[in-house]
């Protein structure tokens, strides 16, 4: 084994051990709008001691890999089936503009892929699989053809749809993958994306493969009716409850269409034209632009009287907001059939369900056929 190969193996092994010690497999990467959270106190020792433990483990690992022939490993991370840890792969740095994949005739520019979704997570039935691409791919047909999905072990049919993205520096586009309809409730989902070495269009090749396993919980769908000023929540088709709301005022309307809960916060700061407030409680985000379900104790009179007066959010009574915060989850669907604002779009949040299936299957920004 050459010195440079041994050095690369040592570097890769240390990197993998350190990431594993930090527990990156257990939480999804933050979406584009999330503020960095302080590390919990019980993980402080891990951040200090983990590299030392990892270093010891690496020494043992290198003794093993030193006997591996140079042709047995090309240094790329590989898809490992249902037990793969895609969030570790998803956290890898963006490929540089000068990087090259080894597959295909000649040397193509490498395209690296990482996922927003976290392996092993529990999501609502509306949660799409979201991937970020380090280059603007030119042809998504090889990716589409290679991607497979199973629901409780049975094959299902899904498709990719692409848009420009500002979510991650160095990753100019994102692709969303879903079925024609919502994921089945209380199911195990496995998505395999074995694209390493495949073409991403002329002069481009993928440099990694990914796999993702997650579960869905109950089919929880909420409908916010602006004519009655009520939010009705159903759980597997059965009514869970109805709650009074105040939506956006005419000058700051609420978008209409199908939205998906993106993140949750017990107490956050919000700002916009003419306001900047902290301590907004029991928040559940619906759009990148700042629409939330949240507690609005200052707006109780308008909520009770059915008057739209918010800055676009769905204002709830404090007790209702807290109850729904505990019941709803990321990936749950919230439908606004008749809100007073413009139509919800894919790029405004996880707006996937506002694109009809025939359009979705074209691939959007990048053709899939």
Image: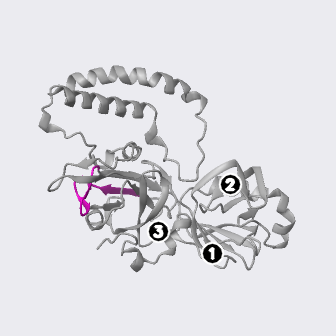
Residue at horizontal 84%, vertical 58%? 298
Q: How dense is the environment of label 2, judged by Cα within 10 Å: few (below 14), some, or many (20 and up)?
A: many
Q: Secondary structure at mark 1?
A: loop
Mark toward the viewer: 1 or 3: 1
Q: How dense is the environment of label 1, judged by Cα within 10 Å: few (below 14), some, or many (20 and up)?
A: many
Q: Quadrant of the N terminus?
A: top left
Q: CA distance from mark 2 to mark 3?
A: 24 Å
Nearest to the observer: residue 197 or residue 240: 197
| 308 to the left or right of 36 | right
Q: Residue 40 placed where, x, y %?
A: 59, 33
* Range shown magenta: 188-208
The reply to whether the C-beta atoms of the residues labelled 1 and 2 are less than 8 Å apart is: no
Q: Mark 2 = which residue?
A: 283
The reply to whether the C-beta atoms of the residues labelled 2 and 3 are less than 8 Å apart is: no
Q: CA distance from mark 1 to mark 3?
A: 19 Å
| Residue 4, quarter of picture | top left
In the picture, the disc for residue 11 is none
Q: Mark 3 = which residue?
A: 182
Q: Reading the chain from its start, which is encountered first: label 1 or label 2?
A: 1
Q: Quadrant of the C terminus?
A: bottom left
Nearest to the observer: residue 334 or residue 29: 29
Total marks shown come to: 3
In the picture, the disc for residue 256 is 1
| 105 to the left or right of 127 | left
- Residue 304 among those drawn in magenta: no
Q: How dense is the environment of label 3, judged by Cα within 10 Å: few (below 14), some, or many (20 and up)?
A: some
Q: Reading the chain from its start, which is encountered first: label 1 or label 3?
A: 3
Q: Reading the chain from its start, which is encountered first: label 2 or label 3?
A: 3
In the rendered view, would you say 33 is above or below 141? above
């Amino acid at each position: 084994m050459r010195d440079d190969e041994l050095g690369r193996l040592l570097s890769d092994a240390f990197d993998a051990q350190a990431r594993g010690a930090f527990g990156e497999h257990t939480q999804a990467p933050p979406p584009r709008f999330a503020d960095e959270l302080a590390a919990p106190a019980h993980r402080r020792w891990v951040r200090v001691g983990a590299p030392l433990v990892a270093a010891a483990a690496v020494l043992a690992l290198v003794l093993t890999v030193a006997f591996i022939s140079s042709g047995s490993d090309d240094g790329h991370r590989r898809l490992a089936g249902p037990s793969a840890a895609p969030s570790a792969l998803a956290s890898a740095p963006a490929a540089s503009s000068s990087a090259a994949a080894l597959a295909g005739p000649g040397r193509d520019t490498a395209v690296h892929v990482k996922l927003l979704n976290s392996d092993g997570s529990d999501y609502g039935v509306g949660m799409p699989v979201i991937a970020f691409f380090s280059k603007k791919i030119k042809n998504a047909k090889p990716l589409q053809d290679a991607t497979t999905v199973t629901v409780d072990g049975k094959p299902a049919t899904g498709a990719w749809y692409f848009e420009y993205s500002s979510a991650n520096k160095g990753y100019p586009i994102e692709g969303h993958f879903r079925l024609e309809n919502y994921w089945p409730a209380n199911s195990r989902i496995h998505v395999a994306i074995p694209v390493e070495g495949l073409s991403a269009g002329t002069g481009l090749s993928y440099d990694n493969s990914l796999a993702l396993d997650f579960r869905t919980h109950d089919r929880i769908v909420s409908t916010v009716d602006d004519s009655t000023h009520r939010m009705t929540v159903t759980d597997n088709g059965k009514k869970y409850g109805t709650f009074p709301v105040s939506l956006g005022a005419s000058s700051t309307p609420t978008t209409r269409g199908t939205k998906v809960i993106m993140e949750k916060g017990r107490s956050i700061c919000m700002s916009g034209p003419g306001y900047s407030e902290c301590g907004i409680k029991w928040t559940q985000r619906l759009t990148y632009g700042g629409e939330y379900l949240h507690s609005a104790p200052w707006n109780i009179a308008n909520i009770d009287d059915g008057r739209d007066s918010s800055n676009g959010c769905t204002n709830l009574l404090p007790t209702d907001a807290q109850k729904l915060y505990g019941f709803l989850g990321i990936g749950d669907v919230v439908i606004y059939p008749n809100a007073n604002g413009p139509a919800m779009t894919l790029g405004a949040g996880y707006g996937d369900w506002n694109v009809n299936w025939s359009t979705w299957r074209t691939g959007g920004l990048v053709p899939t056929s």
